[in-house]
Amino acid sequence: MTVFLCTTCGTSYPPSPEPPARCPICEDERQYVPASGQSWTAWEALSVAHRNAWHRHEAGLLSVQTVPAFGINQRAFLLRTPAGNILWDCIALLDAATEELIHGLGGLVGIAVSHPHYYTTMQDWAAAFDVPIHLHAADRAWVVRPTPAIRFWEGEALELMPGVTLVRVGGHFPGGTVLHWVDGAEGEGVLLAGDIVQVTPGARRVSFMWSYPNMMPLPADEIRRVTASLEPWAFDRIYGAFAGQDVRTDGHAVVQRSAARYIELVEGR
């Protein structure tokens, strides 16, 4: 019995003797099945061909990303606080070095994932560190490998610990979540955004899409709702899903300006 991973999105499936017939995550219009067809790998093969690389962004915040790139190629973040460490978003590869490093930094008290494209092997991370996974209940149907570690939460915000709060903003997925960290950016506030709020390559704008790979936009009213949900939260810096795509300053205003321009374009004004 093998835990197979989709090579396109990195999602892991329940143990089976053969690969799954399909990946519903990729068959959904927000993702894609490659023209070459669906393909699969196993953790053992992934750990031979890849490793994880770390980067320090600021005091208390590290990111980890698999090299060479695998799946969607997102990064995960290790947020360190006096109340314990949180893994924000997830990557498929949990190698021995990563496990040892995180244990050496005090382990984890929890995992939180922005949306289903980054669920990957969250089950294995939760088991390795004996912690819960916090997912918004609106995306419950997209969990293809259930585990008792999952804690589905409801509502618009969940405080994980003082100064660290999950905020449901929706958009890309109904349960699309960002993480707000009060003490980040030297006390000016940080938003860990995944690609629920997508930092663009120039790092001076953000965008909001229903499907990024298929370039399918969100309607204007949904963008208004997303930005309204972020309005009460103060943040100067935004860390996106992908390396190098970070808004270094004025993050709150960048979101509001970007949303206003997006709405102008989709409404033809």
Image (cartoon, rainbow, N blue to C red):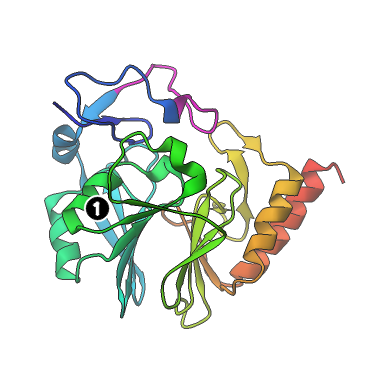
Q: Residue furthest right?
A: 269
Looking at this view, is 263 or 68 the one in front?
A: 263
Q: Does 142 sit above or below residue 190?
A: above
The amino acid type, in three-letter code, at marker 1 is Ala
Residue 77 visible? The answer is no
Q: Is residue 87 left or right of residue 202?
A: left
Task: Name which residue lies at 13% across and 55% down.
Answer: 97
Task: Name which residue lies at 56% across and 38% down.
Answer: 212
- Where in the figure is residue 69, as x and y percent of width and height? 32, 41
Q: How many marks?
A: 1
Is 36 included in the stretch rendered in magenta? Answer: yes
- Where in the figure is residue 52, as x and y percent of width and height? 23, 51
Q: Residue furthest bottom?
A: 187
Prevailing SS of the magenta stretch: loop
- Where in the figure is residue 200, as x and y percent of width and height? 57, 52
Q: Is residue 139 left or right of residue 147?
A: right
Task: Name which residue lies at 29% across and 21% down.
Answer: 20
Q: Which residue is mark 1?
A: 126
Looking at this view, is 216 or 109 the one in front?
A: 109
Q: Does 159 sit above or below residue 23?
A: below
Q: Does 141 sit above or below residue 240?
A: above
Q: Does 211 sit above or below residue 124?
A: above
Residue 95 visible? The answer is yes
Q: Is residue 147 left or right of residue 204?
A: left
Q: Is residue 259 left or right of residue 169?
A: right
Q: Which residues are magenta?
A: 26-39
- Where in the figure is residue 43, as x and y percent of width and height? 18, 36
User: For the N terminus, which image quadrant?
Assistant: top left
Residue 215, quarter of the rendered image: top right
Is 190 included in the stretch rendered in magenta? Answer: no
Where disc 1 sits, the SS reads helix
* Crowd tier of the residue under label 1, counting other residues whose Cα lies within 10 Å: few below 14, some 14–19, many 20 or above: many
